[in-house]
Image (spheres, rainbow, N blue to C red):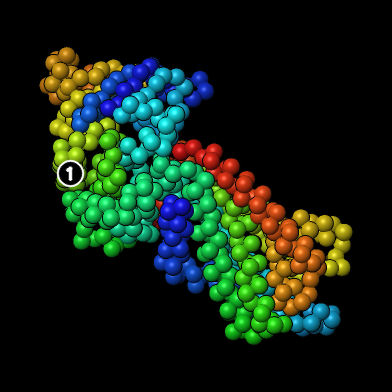
Amino acid sequence: MSAIYILWLRELKRYTRSRAQIVASLGQPMLYLLVLGFGLGNVFQRAGYGSYFQFIAPGVIGMSVLFSSIFSGLGLLWDRQFGFLKETLVAPVPRIQIMIGRTLGGSTVAVIQGTLVMLVCLIAGFRPASWIAVPMVLGFMVLIALLFAALGVAIGSSLQDMQGFQLIMNFLVMPIYFLSGAMFPLTNQGKILTFVTALDPLSYGIDGMRSVLLGKTAFSVFTDLTVLVLVGAILLVFGAYRFSKIEV
Amino acid sequence: MIRVRNLKKTFGTFTAVDDVSFDVDEGEIFAFLGPNGAGKTTTIKMLTTLLKPTEGTIELDGLDPLTHQNEARKRFGIVFQDPSLDGELTAWENMEIHGVLYHVPHKVRRQRTEELLKLFELWERRKDQVKKFSGGMKRRLEIARGFLHTPRILFLDEPTLGLDPQSRNQLWTHVKKVNEAEKVTVFLTTHYMDEADRVAHRIGVIDHGKLVVVDTSKAIKEQTGTESLEEAFLKLTGSTIRDESANSADAMRQFAKMWSSGGKR
């Protein structure tokens, strides 16, 4: 247990110490929120969907949780190259504890990051349907963070170096984001898009947040929760399996 | 303390370590020498449970690391060829994580961390992030960390690579001190023959995966009829240069060095 705790604490310390990075990682969500949120606002309104700023805010929160959780898992690659991974792998601690510590740490960081973005959204003028929604959103953030931190660990365990990183970014992380309905409604879409977006686990996370924040949902809160918990559990097992196979 | 019998490791058709047998006694400092790619690091990796041997047996303090992995791991410390510290954390925090991972009780952990950091002359800098340390300081911290859980054996894989003579000298003085004070067995590899000559009680030379000789420095010199260990080494292993192909990890390290401030390792 103490091994899990100390590795969790390590992730947190690393996060709080890189203040420049915290600010930088707020930049991208802000661009989406402010530029798209206000830029497409008029069109969206005229199409009869209401405020685009309100619509995109949960999407932007989901985006920041996605990015920081998946990158925390991929941080494994850096630890592999700069040695710290070996220090943990030769320790008399079961690998599963090391994996859990890292994943929990990465998820915690991602939830903090998501909360920061939510605060910025609130400051920028976002208003949830009710304030009770805020703690419920936190729950969804935790599920999204765990799911993608586990996916990140699974990928990070399989890659040997950073060359694969760009590939993962362009062919996995960005598609997960763009196909999640973070920026457009999932209802009334073509067959192919409906099918593909339904395969994206982030769709359910963002739909869940949107339904508690705004009361609008494409699936249903129950479906959202079920999918997130199931896929999350599968990915945690898969990530732990991949992590146990690492050789240094 | 270390007992190796007919150890063999093959990667596909390549035999990295071929039928190696040797013993290291308790409290001994044993230097394992060999040209690049001779099988030093592969042997250390097998001894420290990071690689599974293809054939042969290993005993560490009477334990088979294959069947008693965690017990064996508690009994040894290791300092890797390349750094394995977390640069974002402080020296103290790096020690703290190690202590927790090796189940060192809280009180002992604090006390021993203080002792070791003082011994290795890092106590004043304990609250500084490790990324601000010089190469020599990082190495010292890693070795201090390796001693934290009072291991019976300490493995040092080229610990002085890239250090200036002052740091190297200081580092070995500290290692010898702990070796004598705590009766820790030290198993080291190095490319600096003078170090091996000065520090090690006995020396093993490996080449092309095979153990060429195991003896004291004096005996090896007499055997080969040479004046210095360096000459003896060259006589035993020839003077052809072994080129190791760079792998992606080396490329990454190169990249990281390029970007890290001051270009220090």
Q: Nearer the viewer, residue B131 or B96?
A: B96
Residue A140, position in %: x, y?
A: 66, 67
- Residue A124 found in image quarter: bottom right
* Count of marks overlaid on the render: 1
Residue B110 seen by the camera: yes
| Residue A78 appears in view | no
Residue B179 vs A50, above or below: the answer is above
* Among the 4 quarters of the image, the one containing residue A138: bottom right
Q: Residue at x 55, y 72 (%)?
A: A26
* A222 horizontally vs A27: left or right: right
Q: Is residue B180 left or right of residue B156?
A: left
Near-viewer residue (B241 or A192): A192
Q: Position of residue B169 (x, y in %)?
A: 16, 42
Say if A193 sits above or below A97 in the image. Answer: below
Asked if residue A87 is positioned above or below residue B7 in the image, the reply reads below
Q: Quadrant of residue A199?
A: bottom right
Residue at screen point 64% across, 62% down: A144
Check the image and report above or below for A32 versus B104.
below
Residue at 53% across, 41% down: A244
The residue at which mark 1 appears reads as B174
Q: In x, y percent, where is residue A94? A: 47, 43
Residue drawn at x 44%, y 70% as measured from the top left:
A19
Element under disc 1 = helix
* Pointer 1 chain: B
- Foreground residue among A107 and B265: A107
Q: Name which residue type carries label 1.
A: His
Q: Position of residue B26 (x, y in %)?
A: 22, 29
Structural crowding at the residue carrying mark 1, measured as other residues with C-alpha within 10 Å and reported as few (<14), some (14–19) or many (≥20):
some
